[in-house]
Amino acid sequence: MPTRFFSNFRLLTSQQRHAFVAAFLGWSLDAFDYFLLVFCVSAIAADFHARTSAVAEALFLTLAFRPMGAFLFGALADRFGRRPVLMLNIACYSIFELSCAFAPSLHALLILRALFGIAMGGEWGVGAALAFETLPKEGRGFFSGLLQEGYAVGYLVAAAAYALLFKPFTHLVWLGHVVGWRGLFVVGAAPALLVLYIGLKVEESPVWRAGHRKGTKPVSAFSGIRQYGLTFLFVVLLMAGFNSFSHGTQDLYPTFLEKDHGFSAALTGGIAVVYNIGALLGGVLFGGLSERFGRKRTIISAALLALPMIPLFAFGQTMYALAAGAFLMQFMVQGAWGVVPAYLTELSPGPVRATFPGLAYQLGNLLTSRNGVLQAKAAEHYGSYGGVLAVTVLIVAVFLAVVTLFGREAKGVEMTAE
């Protein structure tokens, strides 16, 4: 895999490399900021003397407000270009992440996470449009897998930061290089530095520039979506399945390790690093396989292969069994996800390519945004997170495979502004 990575990357022009790196890092750091909250749910609940399910509302709000950001930033990118809007987007989510460190109450934190969700919702569609309108269509599946696993890289970095830096005191201090949950949110402001890189190194999408030079009349987001309504509805349902697949297996897994098994922050973070390595490998592998076997077949295979992983993932009794189960589960979950950037971009009409996939993605998120809260409440009711996680995987993997079956294949379609 490393050989293939360098081979594919070496064939890119300087412009293509910088565009891909910008989209990859934007998505990675977006995920890093989101997953810092996932690891800090228990600490925040203790700080504000609240139930875990009450803090999980912050996860819900982040996901629920993402469609607003996808529409807002996507429409701006379709009209004014991918590059400047991506810079604005990253600056916004960095500012809101930093603000969370100073939240005086749980209520204030919930408001800030909703604002963060708006900013987070815009990044994926804008970044994917910039990348895939710049990259060659050859190897698109491979780069799709690699781009999507920026999400896993962000989760992995968040896990490492939690394992190495976190100590369960609640006030904002830096002492011996360990911090409380508020200090981790200060670290989460680091993505703002990426704005400088994009400003200095990244060029505008050649597809958007070509359409702009030709004087192509801008199409409103509503018109473009209405024109391709059936495809849009399919993608929304598809992304509802995908978001349930990822968030349903990831968001409360650290809480599961801490509550059901009594693992420390360091051990929980360490296991999260392990399963995010699995996610990264799975995404790149299945993304590449989609070039040979097609997008649909690859997604269905990865989704169904998650089912045999349930016993180790949810019912393992030792640290090693749980780590192995989580590794294999995320290998399959993110294996399916590795196909998504290429598939959604290929399905999207040119004039609204920054809006169409991102909005569908985030509306799918909205449909399933209360999953984390419902999982937490079910676990509180039954006294265990393991069974809840197992049932989630069983239902969602089958749903995702069935929905994908009804879609159309679009591998290798030409990217144009028309």
Image: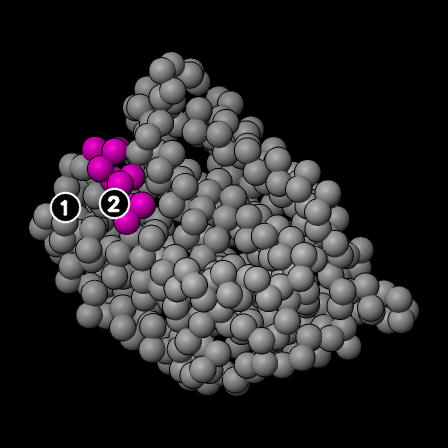
- Amino acid, disc 2: Ile
- Magenta extent: 264-274
Instruction: Identify which residue is drawn at 27% across, 68% down.
Output: 306
> Quarter-wise, where is residue 216 in the image?
bottom right
Tell me residue 246's x, y (percent).
38, 59
Is any part of residue 186 visible from this angle?
Answer: yes
- Compared across the picture, whether 283 is left or right of 308 comes to right
In the figure, 175 relative to 386: above or below? above
Q: Earlier in the sequence, mark 1 or mark 2?
A: 2
Q: How is the image coloured?
A: one colour
Q: Is disc 1 placed on a helix, strand or loop?
A: helix
User: Can you say which quadrant of the picture contains the N terminus?
Assistant: bottom left
Question: Which dot marks residue 271?
Answer: 2
**Which class describes the residues within 10 Å of circle 2: few (<14), some (14-19), or many (20+)?**
many
Q: Position of residue 18 (x, y in %)?
A: 64, 53
> In the rendered structure, are the residues bearing label 1 and label 2 in contact, judged by CB atoms less than 8 Å apart?
yes
Q: Kindly indicate the quadrant of the structure image that contains residue 402.
A: bottom left
309 in relation to 55, above or below: below
| 268 in the magenta segment | yes
Q: Residue drawn 66% across and 42% down?
A: 197
139 magenta-colored: no
Residue type at tag 1: Met
Q: Residue at x 30, y 46 (%)?
A: 272
Say left or right for 81 vs 42: right
* Disc sitting over residue 319 in the figure: 1
The spot of residue 98 in percent (x, y) is 55, 29
Relative to 8, say whether 111 is above or below.
above
> CA–CA distance between discs 1 and 2?
8 Å
The C terminus sits in image quarter: bottom right
